[in-house]
Image (cartoon, helix red, strand yellow):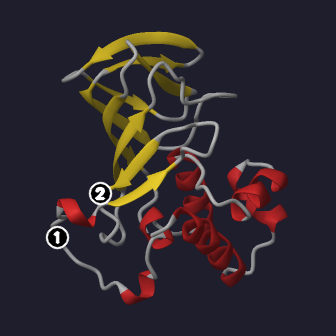
Amino acid sequence: MEDKLLTKRLKEIRLHRKLTLEKLAALTGLSKGYLSQIENSDQPPPIYTLSRISNALGIDISELFTHADTVPYQEIIVGRCDEHRLLSGAGTPYGYVYEDLASNKKGKNMEPFIVTVGSNRRIDVQKDFCHEGEEFIYVLEGTLEFFYDGKSYCVLEAGDHVYFDADKPHSGRSLGGKEAKLLLVIYSYKRL
């Protein structure tokens, strides 16, 4: 799905659920202005923000990529490399790219992604991310400095990983002049 279609889909779902921007802001903890900016943008927000919005809307993130009512429940899915949904944040201050790995699985608790963080660029820019649930990051390539609860927590090399409660502020930045490529799994406590 094109990035612009994803932001349009957010608005469609919000309107279908008869939610005002004010109500969605109250449910997400995000400002009404920021939510409006997302809906009118050609670029999607960060994964963490998508997760927060989809939880507030009572949907899986995957429903932003497809019309969930047309996707039957499947006990198991197999994803092929040519089916990954690629979203670019190149036009945003975050400047990362992520691939949604399991958008076809309905009713899931985990949201797996491949995230590429530009070289020497901290992905939080203005603030760290914070959301309900747990998160797992596995470094596939490059070096990532991981920030947790307001401080630099550790440096992760390819093959290293971190698993943490995501309700504390967290972010990361690539080091060494090379992009960091990560397997990121967000676990939501809310089962649909």
Q: Which residue is mark 1?
A: 76
190 or 61, which lies in front?
61
Closer-to-camera residue (92/68): 92
Q: Quadrant of the C terminus?
A: bottom left
Considering only vertical position in the picture, is 10 above or below 50? Answer: below
The part of the image, by quadrant, that contains residue 7 is bottom right
Q: Is 101 drawn above or below residue 46 in the view shown?
A: below
Q: Nearer the viewer, mark 1 or mark 2?
A: 2
| Residue at figure coordinates x 44%, y 23% from the top left | 119
SS at badge 2? loop
Amino acid under disc 2: Leu
* C-beta proximity under 8 Å, tags 1 and 2: no
Disc marking residue 101: 2
Q: Residue at the spot x=70%, y=57% of the render?
A: 38
Q: Residue at 64% of width from left, 60% of height from top?
A: 42
Q: Examine the rendered structure and indicate whether residue 42 appears above or below residue 96.
A: below
Dividing the picture into quadrants, the one containing residue 66 is bottom left
Residue visible at 29% across and 61% down in the picture: 84
Could you give the CA–CA distance between mark 1 and mark 2, rounded to whole angstroms? 13 Å
